[in-house]
Image: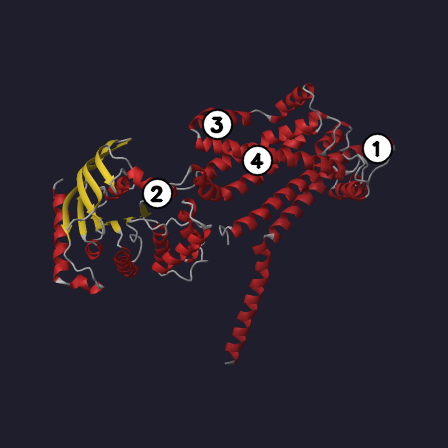
Amino acid sequence: MKYLKELEKGCEQVTVMNKRLRIGSDNKILPVICIITFIIIIWYGFSIVLNAPWEFDKAKRNSITLSKTELVSQTWSQKRPKLPTPHQVAKEMWDTTINKKITSKRSLVYHGLITFYETIYGFAFGTGLGILLALGIVYNRATAMSVMPWIITSQTIPILAIAPMIVVALGSAGFSGLMPIVIISMYLSFFPVVVGMVKGLKSPEQLDIDQMKTWSASKSQVLFKLRAPKSTPYLFTSLKLGMAASLVGAIVGELPSGGGGGLGFRMLSGSTFGNTLHIWSGLFSAAILAGSLIAIIGVIQRIVLKRMALET
Amino acid sequence: MVQSEVINVSNLDLTFETGDGPVHALKNVDLKVNKGDFVSFIGPSGCGKTTLLRVLADLDEPTAGEVTVNGVSPREAREARAYGYVFQAAGLYPWRNVAANVKLPLEIMGYSKEEQLKRVKKVLDLVELTGFENKYPWQLSGGMQQRASIARALAFDADILFMDEPFGALDEIVRDHLNKQLLELWKSTNKTICFVTHSIPEAVYLSTKIVVMSPRPGRIVDIIDSNLPSDRPLEIRDSKDFIEISQRVREGLRAGHSDE
């Protein structure tokens, strides 16, 4: 009897432990932390390797030999490193967001806001255009045949190649500033929306369409009562892709525009003046911006789909 | 007794053009359905029973022949919303609860909000789904989904009801129960029902007229007028008359098959 009770107790402990262990794997936090730690270690390693030649040169000029600890501490704290360390990037980002006025051109918030507006406008116009094109393709065979090849072609042209042309062409037409960049951003973001929404609007099955026909539903009723609600999950997937594409478009658009500001401009100027800290901090800001915008869409998606009972 | 004719099909022919050449789906079909009839179409798969129903509902177009529904063409009948159609799958919208699903055709047909509520309540009561108004399709069993689908087809109170193997995917016990309910519903509403099935007992149990069909090309081999009483408890299936009619249906099916 005593033995049995102890066995039971042991089993309970095992289940408790299993539950505890599962918290990590269920939330996927543990693997993420592992990967990040791994990347950071590699990064610090490369910081040493890439920044070391400069330290060796300096030591040679001053005729001193560097100990290993000196080498490491110096490569990790250069003013103009080839590869800045994560903590240097973090410090740079902290300095240029918290310690600078938002209106200052040296503030990451200032540049981030510019890129944010370009992205949002490009995203809004791109989504609108994408949905309109999708409707045209689904409802009109002629549109489908004539427009689809152009849509595909538009995405095979490298955006970096035509971005300067758009900036120059619109500039000579009297449009400068935000507008050309918004157009480039739209150019990239409408595509996933077209593809996703064509699929979504066509997702009702023959049965659904026949059923509508037995009720003599009009075309607009079929659209609003069947096709549109049925395509909602597709819409959100498209919006996420479109948002990411908008941000890329905004950053690429900033490069040839010059002067205007934005995270792309910040990275370009960092590259021009050899300030790697500006590049990396700009890069991370862009990543954080994209991540946040997509996360916001994700939250809206969950709320909407839950309300529509399409997700539990 | 003069009975008013609801459906009249004469010399109907339908050929589908497919990638593998033409498929003769219906050949020389003649049929008359009177008001208040419960007609079953029975036959093996590929005999064109569903296609015939779809032609009556203007979902498929005949290649040749005359079809009238309520005295007009199927298209005009459809546009006049003369029939309700129940498909093999319930086809409920997952983003609408039961009441909203039943309301859908009423919204499309422009009924007033009050009228919509009144009718939804009435038909849900008819199919015994009262209390499930706010449930979503995934919360219902297959039988309940199909009942909701029938309620939706009844909501706008058309005189004709087309049903394409509505209980085909359900188990026998649920099917018996729904058959019984359907008969009661038919008697209380006096609708004309065209019912596609491949189950002999189901066809005999439900119908006043059984249309036996055979495949390749799809055609009618026998039309049996049932003399079973209108009051049909499930036990009627053990009666002599029931068994006789079943045998005649079976013979018709066999004859159609041996033609090949």
Q: Earlier in the sequence, mark 3 or mark 2?
A: 3
- Residue holding disc 4: A127
Same-chain check, marks 3 and 1: yes
- Measured as percent of width and height from the top left, residue A213 is found at 36, 40
What is the crowding at mark 4: few (fewer than 14 residues within 10 Å), some, or many (at least 20)? many
Which badge, 3 or 1, comes first in the chain's sequence?
1
In this view of the protein, which residue sits in the foreground, B91 or A49? B91
- Of the residues tagged 3 and 1, which is closer to the observer? 3
Say what amino acid the circle numbered 3 marks: Met
Secondary structure of the residue carrying numbered label 4: helix
Marks 3 and 2 in Cβ contact (< 8 Å): no
The residue at which mark 3 appears reads as: A148
In front here: A80 or A42?
A80
| Residue at which label 2 appears | A214
Left or right of B198? Residue A247 is: right
Q: Earlier in the sequence, mark 4 or mark 3?
A: 4
- Mark 2 belongs to chain: A
Q: Estimate how packed mark 3 is, as few (under 14), some (14 to 19) or many (20 or more) residues with alpha carbons within 10 Å.
A: some
Instruction: Indicate the amino acid at tag 1.
Output: Lys
Q: Viewer-nearest of labels 2 and 4?
A: 2
- Choose the circle earlier in sequence order: 4 or 1: 1
User: Where's residue B25, x and y in %?
Assistant: 22, 37
Disc nearer the start of the sequence (2/1): 1
Residue A58: assigned label: 1
Label 4 to label 3: alpha-carbon separation: 16 Å
Q: Are marks 2 and 4 on the same chain?
A: yes
Label 2 to label 4, Cα distance in Å?
33 Å
In the picture, the disc for residue A294 is: none
**Residue under mark 1: which chain is it in?**
A
